[in-house]
Image (cartoon, rainbow, N blue to C red):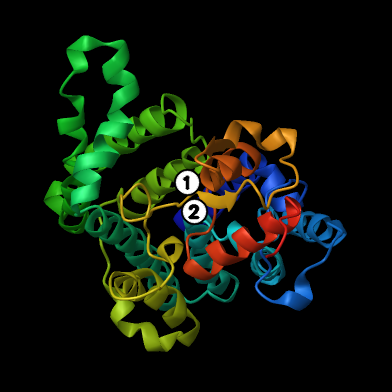
Amino acid sequence: MNRRLRILLIALNICTLLALLLSWNLWIGIHSFPKIPLFELLNFKSNALDLGLVGLLLIGLVSSMFFSKTRLPLLLILASILSLILLDINRLQVWVFHFFLAYSILLSLAKSNKVLGSELLIFSSMQVLTLSMYLWTGINKLNASFFENVAPYIAAPLMHKFTSFIYFDNIIMIAPFLGLSFIPLLMIQKTRSVALLSIMIYHGIAIFLVGFAGYNSNDIIIPWNLFILASAFILFGNTHGFQPKFVRIFDKPNLIGPLLLAGLFPILSHFGNYPYNMSWDVYSGRISYEHLKLSTLDVETVPSYLDEFTTSYGGFIYIDTYSWAMKELNTPPFNHPWVDQEIAEKSRELLKVRLR
């Protein structure tokens, strides 16, 4: 196995473990926030299956670092993640999407130990995955809401503490352009050192502002950003640089799906209800989370654990489902109209809303 890809797999496993720990309640199913199974027949009351699948996932993560000549650990990881997502679509976060695609590509490693061309194809596919992430996270931020709302929101904690940073939000506004610039800078050998230094600063600032200093301290982005940073250095930090072997993608048909999902399909989110979570959409301003609105006449009782997320005004109760999810799961809800409807319906059941 290629040494760099081996290191990348270890980095991916470590970041996955860290992300699981930071969002532990989301995965073991012990929380009051509504679980949204992809199919009604998977709507189990018990969380025993969730615990079993998390156990299998942990076994796969650990064993893949010691048994690299077999595909079974990676298959176990992918099957466990997919099954857990089927049990609750809220688990399909942007970082889960990225990690799942990375494991899907690395699944070919076990059969590539002695095939140099095949190994280079996998290496190139991982490079394309990283470049696709920078492409769409940049494009998705090119909208008015990012510049008017998201950038000031991210910069606000620092601006409030240090008056010398009063125009810091203007610096945040260059983020989408900077992310897009990483693509050519990484592909051109002469500019690769500049790219890697810029990427290190870029993700370091993101981890500090969003992971530690942000209003909601969204620390789940830390392992994701660490993996992106590791990917950039492992995949591009050498004299060979970008290797466009992915043009021979049909040599390995199992790589086609992950690369289409990573590089092409995100464009669909700009024209329809294609999930933002599968479009590298994070802190872009394109996603809006509406409060759940209920009449006070229809609600029998509001549980005490929802008090901090509930506001009463004008005969209505408003529940901030985004803050509710962040508090209990350390992740936002999966953003899609169907999921919003399901969350609203299950919340009404939880609150014992009287039907008129």
Residue 141 pos. (x, y %): 25, 52
Report if the CB atoms under discs 1 and 2 are less than 8 Å apart: yes
Q: Camera-side residue: 192 or 171?
A: 171
46 sits left or right of 88 in the view: right
Label 1 vs label 2: CA separation? 6 Å
Q: Is residue 51 above or below residue 21?
A: below
The residue that label 2 is drawn on is 95
Residue 194 lies in quadrant: top left
Q: Is residue 63 visible?
A: no
Which residue is depicted at the point 66% across and 37% down? 306
Residue 165 pos. (x, y %): 20, 17
The residue that label 1 is drawn on is 224
Split into 4 quadrants, where in the image is the N terminus? bottom right
Q: Is residue 74 visible?
A: yes
Residue 84 pos. (x, y %): 70, 63
186 sits left or right of 32 in the view: left
